[in-house]
Each structure stands twice: as C-alpha cells, then as structure tokens.
Amino acid sequence: RFYIPWLRKMKAGQEIKEIGPSWHMAKTGTPTMGGFIFIFAAAVVCLTVGFSSMRNGDYAHIFILLFALVFGAIGFLDDYIKVVLKRSLGLTVIQKLVLQGVVALLFCYYYMVRISDECEMLVPFTGGIRDGIYLTMPKWLFFIFIYIIMIGTVNGVNLTDGLDGLASSVTLLIVVFFSIAALKSGSSLVLSGGCVAGALMGFLLFNVYPAKVFMGDTGSLALGGFVAAMAVELKMPLYIAIVGIIYLAEVLSVILQVVYFKLSGGKRLFRMAPLHHHFEQCGWRETTVVALFSIVTTVMCIAAILD
C-alpha cells in the first residue's frame, strides 16, 4: 500500500531489455526492487519470533537469513544502479559473479567451521531425514560442492525471475518444502522458512500477472541465497536438483543455448533462453508458463516429501 507508490514516486521503474519478447515492452516502468519489502518483513518477524531460540544457542535460522540478506544487498546494488542511477547495465556479469563468489566463500568457510568434520548430505529417496543414507565426502571436496550449489542456486533463481509471479511462486513452494523438512528434523530453520514463505505469499498478491511490482535482483538473489543456505544447513543440498528442477532447467537452457550457438555457427537450440521465454515464443501465454512451472515444482516437492 505504501511501498509501491513510493517506488513510483522515486521512478524506480523496470527497463525491459529489447532482446526479450517484444510484448514484454508493455511492462516498462513497472516498479522494481520489490524484493526489499518481503526481505524486510521476513527478517523482522524471524528476529522477533526466533529470539528465544537464539538465547538457547540455536541460531541456525539467523545464520542463513544473514547470508540471504547479504546476497540481497548485491542485488539491491545492481537494481539501484539500473533504476535510480539510470545505468541500464547495472553491475557487469563479472562484478556480479565476483561479489557472489566472495559471499559464497564466506558462507562455505563459516559453515565448515561450524560443522567440524560432519561433511555429509542426505541422498534423496533413500528413506528420508531419519532413516536415509547420508553421503560423506572429504572436507575440501564438500567445500567446493556447496560453493557450486550456492552460486548455481542464486543464479538459477535470478534467471527464473523473468515472468510475473514465476520466481516467487516456484520459490514459495521450495521454501515450504524445506520448512517441512526442518520441522521433521526439529530444526529452528522452520522459523526462518515460515517467515520467508509468509512474506512471499503477501508479495505474490502484487507480483502475479499483471504484476504491480517486480522483486528485482534484490529479491531473486536473496531468495537464491536463502534456499541454498537452508538446503545446506539441513544437509539436503542434493534435493535442490529435485525440488528446484525449474532453476536447473533455466540455467541449463542458457548454457546450452550459448554453447550450441557458438558450435553451430549461429544456430539456436531454443527459440529464446532462459527456458520460460522459449515457451512464450512457442505461443504459450505467460500465465500458462507460470502455472506449468509451478505444477512441476509442486509434483517434485510432493515426491521429495513422500521420501
């Protein structure tokens, strides 16, 4: 009620790139940086409700929220440069990757110090959190693995954020899944997971088609960092490839498009990448693509929950 009008007053409107679908140009000027409001809401509630857990020495929910906020700060800087300073390119790809890499390294280092020698993760569909098989690996290899998971997930959410309500609806389902997993394991992460899920529900009211506000990189990078950190903390990073199959598909579509374009001398594997734009170019409505991707995510989350 107050934040969106303020964004309009600040002229923090989204600039739609010409390389995207032509019909997206109608979205030019829609307020962006909306991710700040649900991050702020989730942080306030999490710190308030979860304070008693902190006094008991359990601060895992604060730990992952902190790194989500730092990733969100990178996105906020990018959005600020683009929409406030009117530099359409924002941060360069290299600058983004370097900043993300530094934060991911800090996360990996701090996590490895906290867990001591317990470098293990749950293997999907082997019996669940209590009875499942846990894969153990050397500390150095585990460090590299969770670093890749962190960077991949953050950029996967960022690429998924290309249609009204797509990234927010898909990520909401994934956060709910990991919150259920946290509840089963008795982890305090159910607090931060519940806060982020609740904040996303509120945000979706304004982000569904036709969107009144976009989350921007502020929101997408924060959500990516949160999902990755939550999965690692629960020793379930392998589950991201299952419940986050849309993230994976979006990233792979971009990689395959670039590689195929170079190897084939200018031919395209998809009509447009990321994947959601390919479906649009095939004649699918934006709302249909969002519904399909949400249904796929729901099915994968249910399959993982029933493990």
Image (tube, helix red, strand yellow):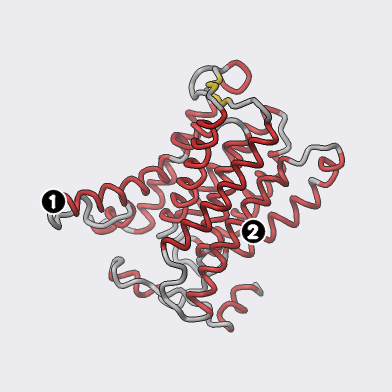
Amino acid residing under circle 1: Ser
| Label tally | 2
Amino acid residing under circle 2: Ile
Q: With respect to residue 117, does 18 lie above or below?
A: below
User: Crowding near pointer 2: few (<14 within 10 Å), some, many (20+)?
Assistant: many
SS assignment at label 1:
loop
**Residue ID at (26%, 47%):** 256
Q: Whole-percent x and y of residue 161?
A: 44, 57
Which quadrant of the rendered structure holds the N terminus?
Answer: bottom right
Q: Nearer the viewer, residue 149 or 10?
A: 149
Tell me: 307 left or right of 50: left
Q: Earlier in the sequence, mark 2 or mark 1?
A: 2
**Residue ID at (52%, 44%):** 150
Q: Do the CB atoms of the residues marked 2 and 1 lie less than 8 Å apart?
A: no
SS assignment at label 2:
helix
Q: Residue furthest front?
A: 140
Q: Nearer the viewer, residue 68 or 307?
A: 68
Q: Quadrant of residue 203?
A: bottom right
Tell me: 122 left or right of 270: right
Question: Looking at the rendered structure, which numbered label has been put on residue 201?
Answer: none
Write down the residue under mark 1. Answer: 264
Tell me: 125 left or right of 67: left
**Residue ID at (38%, 72%):** 16
Write down the residue under mark 2. Answer: 39
Q: Whole-percent x and y of residue 144?
A: 50, 37
Q: Nearer the viewer, residue 226 or 141?
A: 141
Q: Whole-percent x and y of residue 305?
A: 54, 28
Please name which of the two marks, 2 or 1, marks the residue nearer to the observer.
1
Q: Nearer the viewer, residue 166 or 221?
A: 221
